[in-house]
């Protein structure tokens, strides 16, 4: 009951909160390119998985695609920048000028709703039947993807956002016992202070989207599931004292971070923990792929735990792939979508990416120790939608939150102004 209720509530909220999106012109999409390109044997796949472990994940998918559809050429349209920080704007420009890629990555939830509202996506519900996917995904995920009986994407994975990654050696040097996990943000602040006094960077962070990511996890931890979910349905007041308390904690946490953050992306911040320059980093579980890529062992080389106070919550986000209106190579896109939904594709991709399969029939034993904890948590914990990764709010709302936050963290506003601007951004 717990999960279906929350996700169903979100799907309903998505209709209420739907922003006007980019106003793409579905009628003219495709245009000349579609005519000249026909449905030829290629597929341009647009993602932001351009480098490092994210590229490795994409390549794992590409390899399965090559086996399943050897006659279709894979064209990598990735645009670098974590969380789509550069890709999403470029995508919007392409969609609005009638030049869509054949398929693009979009998060399940409110972000997808933006594209649906703008008439930029084809209904792919028939493909679920054709590829035998109707029973492959959890009902609540299908519900989140379904709008008025139509389904507009096929999910490739599920990531968890509310995870702390830490270097146990740095903690020990600071006199913090790595085996004891703080139970709340306030308890964690005591540990952060000890690390700061030891001379290491206590909490590594990067560009503004990673700060939104940190904020969402503080909101989850401090408000609890019901009040956090209420932020997206209108039931929780962004101007209220609970949010003020969480913002105060966020401000304190930011005080422990590296100052050279704005030019950095998530791998740089996670790398600081790997290198022993920083003790903690809060990041989604794509970070585990970076530790693994560096040959760092869970338990000895790094530890992970839910953001203090958010134990029992699964900060949810899911990548999914679409068939844009006017895609120049719809047959290539359908072939890609078949690979995305297939068991073989999901196993290969998720093993490399750090996420867990969206399909329910993958064998957990195929995955790493960390991923097995995520599979368990997804099955038993409360599901709370990620803000920074498109599950909870539209791109418009997210951009408003990020602008307000980066103004604050760069010294351009105080806490009161931040809260007022968050109220504006989310209303
Ligand atoms: C998320 C995406 C993940 C990962 C991350 C960092 O938005 O869902 O798959 O790529 O950004 O770039």
Image (spheres, rainbow, N blue to C red):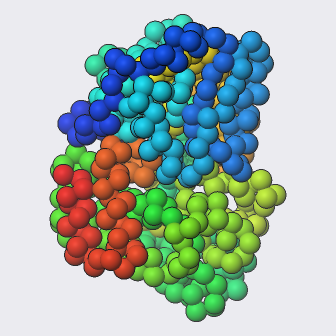
Give residue 254's position: percent from left, percent from top.
45, 76
Q: Residue 276 is drawn in which quadrant? A: bottom right
Q: Residue at x 31, y 65 (%)?
A: 404
Instruction: Point out the image quarter for the N terminus.
Output: top left
As rendered, which of 390 and 363 lies closer to the eye? Answer: 390
> What percent of the width, then of the height, locates residue 198?
63, 91
Q: Looking at the image, is 219 positioned above or below residue 361?
A: below
Which residue lies at the image location 46% right of the left edge and 19% below the top edge?
30
Look at the image and tell me whether residue 369 can be seen: no
Residue 214 vertical placement versus 352 (above, below): below
Could you tell me if residue 231 is visible in this image?
A: yes
Residue lying at 61% horizontally and 16% vertically, measured from the top left: 332
Q: Is residue 352 above or below residue 324?
A: below
Give the residue drawn at x 41%, y 49%.
Answer: 386
Residue 356 coordinates in the image, percent (x, y): 60, 39
Query: Residue 87: x and y, percent?
Result: 51, 44
Q: Residue furthest bottom?
A: 197
- In the figure, 397 relative to 216: above or below? above
User: Along the horizontal axis of the image, is 308 left or right of 48?
Assistant: left
In this rendering, would 117 be left or right of 45? Answer: left
* Total number of numbered discs in the rendering: 0
């Amino acid at each position: 009951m717990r999960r279906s209720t929350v996700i169903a509530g979100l799907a309903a909220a998505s209709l209420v909160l739907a922003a006007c999106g980019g106003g793409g012109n579905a009628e003219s999409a495709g245009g000349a390119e579609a005519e000249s390109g026909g449905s030829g044997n290629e597929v341009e796949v647009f993602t932001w998985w351009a480098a490092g472990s994210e590229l490795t994940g994409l390549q794992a998918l590409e390899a399965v695609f090559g086996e399943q559809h050897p006659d279709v050429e894979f064209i990598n349209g990735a645009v670098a920048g974590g969380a789509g920080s550069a890709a999403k704007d470029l995508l919007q420009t392409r969609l609005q000028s009638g030049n869509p890629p054949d398929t693009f990555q979009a998060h399940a939830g409110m972000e997808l709703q933006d594209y649906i509202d703008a008439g930029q996506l084809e209904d792919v519900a028939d493909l679920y039947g054709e590829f035998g996917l109707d029973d492959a995904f959890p009902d609540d995920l299908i519900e989140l993807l379904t709008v008025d009986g139509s389904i507009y994407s096929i999910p490739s994975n599920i990531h968890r956002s509310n995870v702390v990654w830490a270097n146990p050696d740095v903690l020990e040097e600071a006199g913090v016992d790595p085996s004891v996990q703080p139970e709340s943000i306030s308890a964690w602040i005591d540990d952060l202070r000890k690390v700061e006094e030891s001379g290491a960077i206590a909490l590594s962070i990067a560009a503004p989207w990673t700060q939104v990511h940190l904020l969402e996890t503080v909101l989850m931890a401090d408000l609890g599931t019901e009040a956090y979910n209420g932020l997206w349905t209108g039931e929780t007041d962004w101007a209220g004292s609970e949010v003020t308390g969480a913002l105060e904690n966020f401000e304190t946490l930011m005080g422990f971070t590296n100052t050279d953050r704005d030019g950095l992306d998530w791998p740089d911040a996670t790398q600081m923990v790997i290198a022993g320059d920083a003790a903690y980093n809060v990041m989604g579980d794509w970070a585990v792929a970076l530790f693994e890529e560096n040959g760092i062992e869970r338990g000895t080389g790094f530890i992970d735990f839910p953001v203090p106070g958010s134990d029992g919550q699964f900060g949810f986000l899911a990548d999914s792939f679409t068939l844009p209106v006017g895609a120049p190579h719809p047959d290539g896109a359908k072939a890609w979508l078949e690979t995305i939904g297939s068991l073989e594709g999901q196993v290969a991709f998720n093993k490399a990416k750090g996420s867990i399969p969206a399909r329910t029939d993958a064998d957990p034993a195929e995955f790493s120790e960390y991923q097995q904890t995520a599979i368990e948590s997804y099955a038993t914990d409360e599901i709370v939608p990620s803000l920074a990764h498109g599950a909870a709010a539209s791109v418009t709302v997210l951009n408003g939150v990020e602008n307000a936050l980066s103004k604050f963290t760069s010294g351009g506003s105080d806490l009161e102004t931040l809260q007022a601007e968050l109220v504006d951004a989310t209303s």
